[in-house]
Each structure stands twice: as C-alpha cells, then as structure tokens.
C-alpha cells in the first residue's frame, strides 16, 4: 500500500521531517564535494556562461512563454524566478550524460557551480519580485507588451459577466477574493438571495466561475475600472476576503470612492488593523484572532455546562472591550 494514500500518511510525513532536513544537508554537502574550486580559476568564463543561462536566459524564456500563454506579468515573473536555479533533477541528467560520454568533466563542473550559486541566490531574487514588477510598471510600453495577451483574455472574460451584472435584479454583493473564505461568503450570500460578483486575480479561477454561470471579474480590486465592471457603484455590500493586510486598505478606499453608501465588510488578521481599515472606509472589520479566541472560549464553556445566556454575556463583554461588533 502506498504510504501517501494510507490513513497514517500525515503522521508519516511529520515523522519524516527530521530525515528530510538531514537529507537536504547531505545533498548540499555532496554538491560542495563535487565541485573543484580551481575550476573557477582555470575556466571562469564557462562558469559565467552557465550562470547566464540559468539566471538570465532561462527565466526570460519562461517569462516570455507564460506571457504568450495569456497570463499576467505577476504570474510570469513568479514562474521565471522559480526557474532561475538548477534543481536535483539536473544532477541526474548530468550523471546520465556523463555515463554516456555526452558531458565532459568541464561541463560537470559548470553544472555544479551553477547549481551552488543559483540555489543560494534564488531566495534573495524572490524577495525582489515586487521591486521588479514595480520597475516594469514604470515602463508602460514594455508593460503593455508583456500584458497584451493577458489583457485581451481578461477583457473577453469580463465581457461575459458584465451583461449579467447589469441586469441583476437581486441585491448586489461584490466579493474580493475567492479563496476558502471567499467561497464560503459567496455560497452563503447566494443562498440568502444576493447576486454575488467575484473579483479575482487568478484567471483560471475566473474562467471556471464564468463557465459555471457565476458572475466573476478578473483584475486588481484597487483599480476603480475593475470595481466599476463588477458593479460596485450599485452594490449594497462589498466584502474583502483577502488574507494579506497590505492589500486590504487600498481596496476599501477605492470601493468607498465609487460608492459612498455601500456597506464594506473586511477580513483582518489582527485587532491592530482596525484603525487603518476604518480610516480607509470600512464599516465592519472581522478579526481572525478575535473570532478564533471567542469560538474556542465558547466551545470550552459549553463543554463545561455553562448556560447560553451566561456565555453570551461574557463573550459580549469581551467583544465590547475589544471593539468587535456582533
């Protein structure tokens, strides 16, 4: 029986974590032992050429391919940076090539050197994702060229939902994000008689929602044009389910500018985010840490046999102290 398909798969994975770390250490030590430092002195240009292919040529090719397939620049950059390294499989291919005399010893040294440098630099390059994207945005012509197919794909997708949104007779609720929280909110609001519109940055998710008959708009919710396409001007509720705190306030501010009367409910992780979100225009903020604490306390008190009025009174007082509304 395959371990991954057994009932104890999660426990087996947890027990194997120390071994995984040990094997990771062995891998990097082994790679280091394969490398001959004198090669950097005798053939430095070969190493530079190898690194140029791994760190520049391969990411640029990957970025171009992803952009041509119709995905946005953010996705293309993520894929490109993720491929800007040499993984373990390359050593297997190198071994096979050496065995069949297709790869000379110099090529093996270039492979090892490129792997060591690219694996070391990759986490640092990933931190540059946002600055790289910002730099591309400052070059409108290049940005438009890279986003051309993605924008055409997005325009076609959004055109499918807009007539349905415009003709909706039910109260309109716009939901930003379609992760686990967004899916729950969407399902419950539709059951409550709302016409829901999803704003999502994942093209595949928007395509899937559109095909299943749901109203969905692709785009950045901080963009007023995207919010306008989603019908925010006539929406009665605007729900932000984004997990990242840096994205929430600009979205709330953009929605409030379009519709002064829409009721904005925002998901937040920490109680300390209240002031920023309320200043941006949020009517109600739901705090993950507060709600989790209250739910845990309620469960324990119910298990101990406390009556519901007492539990509600205690938790109500806590909500008042923390500034959480029912």
Image (tube, rainbow, N blue to C red):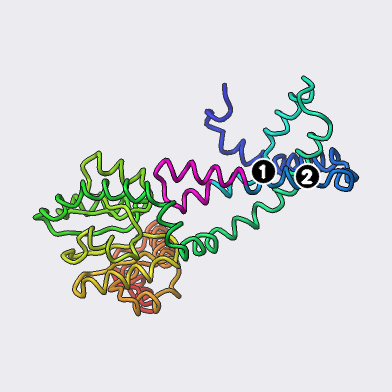
Query: Is 247 situated above or below 119?
Result: below
Q: Quadrant of residue 295?
A: bottom left
The residue to which callout 2 is attached is 47
Residue, disc 1: 53
Inspect the magenta stretch and tell me whether residue 61 lies in it. yes
Mark 2–mark 1 Cα distance, whole angstroms, equals 10 Å
Q: Which residues are magenta?
A: 57-79
Q: Is residue 43 left or right of residue 227?
A: right
Where is residue 258? Give x, y as percent: 23, 71
Image height check: is 142 above or below 22? Answer: below
Number of other residues with Cα within 10 Å of mark 2, as a class: few under 14, some 14 to 19, many 20 or more: many
Of callouts 2 and 1, the N-terminal one: 2
Marks 2/1 in contact by CB < 8 Å: the verdict is: no
Residue for point 43% across, 59% down: 141
| Residue at figure coordinates x 52%, y 50% from the top left | 78
Q: Residue drawn 84% across and 41% down?
A: 35
Q: Left or right: where does residue 287 sit relative to residue 62?
A: left
Question: Which residue is rendered at x = 38% and y = 62% of the image?
Answer: 298
Quarter-wise, where is residue 131 in the image? Answer: bottom right
Quick one: 173 or 211, which is closer to the camera?
211
Residue 75 coordinates in the image, percent (x, y): 47, 49
Determine the secondary structure under disc 2: helix
Front residue of 267/228: it is 228
């Amino acid at each position: 029986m395959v371990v991954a398909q057994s009932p104890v798969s999660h426990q087996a994975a947890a027990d194997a974590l120390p071994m995984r770390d040990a094997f990771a250490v062995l891998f990097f030590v082994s790679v280091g032992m394969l490398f001959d430092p004198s090669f950097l002195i005798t053939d430095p240009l070969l190493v530079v050429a190898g690194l140029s292919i791994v760190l520049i040529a391969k990411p640029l090719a990957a970025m171009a391919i992803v952009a041509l397939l119709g995905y946005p620049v953010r996705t293309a950059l993520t894929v490109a940076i993720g491929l800007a390294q040499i993984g373990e499989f390359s050593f297997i291919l190198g071994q096979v090539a050496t065995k069949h005399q297709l790869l000379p010893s110099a090529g093996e040294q270039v492979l090892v050197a490129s792997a060591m440098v690219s694996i070391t630099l990759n986490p640092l390059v990933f931190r540059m994702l946002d600055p790289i994207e910002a730099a591309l945005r400052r070059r409108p012509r290049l940005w438009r060229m890279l986003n051309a197919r993605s924008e055409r794909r997005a325009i076609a997708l959004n055109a499918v939902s807009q007539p349905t949104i415009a003709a909706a007779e039910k109260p309109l609720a716009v939901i930003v994000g379609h992760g686990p929280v967004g899916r729950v909110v969407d399902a419950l609001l539709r059951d409550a008689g709302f016409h829901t519109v999803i704003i999502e940055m994942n093209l595949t998710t928007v395509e899937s929602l559109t095909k299943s008959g749901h109203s969905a708009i692709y785009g950045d919710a901080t963009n007023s044009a995207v919010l306008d396409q989603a019908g925010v001007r006539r929406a009665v509720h605007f729900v932000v389910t984004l997990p990242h705190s840096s994205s929430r306030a600009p979205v709330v501010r953009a929605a409030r500018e379009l519709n002064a009367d829409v009721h904005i409910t925002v998901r937040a992780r920490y109680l300390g985010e209240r002031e920023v979100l309320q200043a941006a225009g949020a009517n109600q903020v739901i705090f993950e840490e507060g709600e989790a604490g209250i739910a845990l306390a309620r469960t324990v008190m119910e298990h101990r046999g406390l009556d519901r009025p007492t539990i509600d009174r205690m938790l109500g007082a806590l909500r008042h102290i923390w500034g959480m509304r029912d």
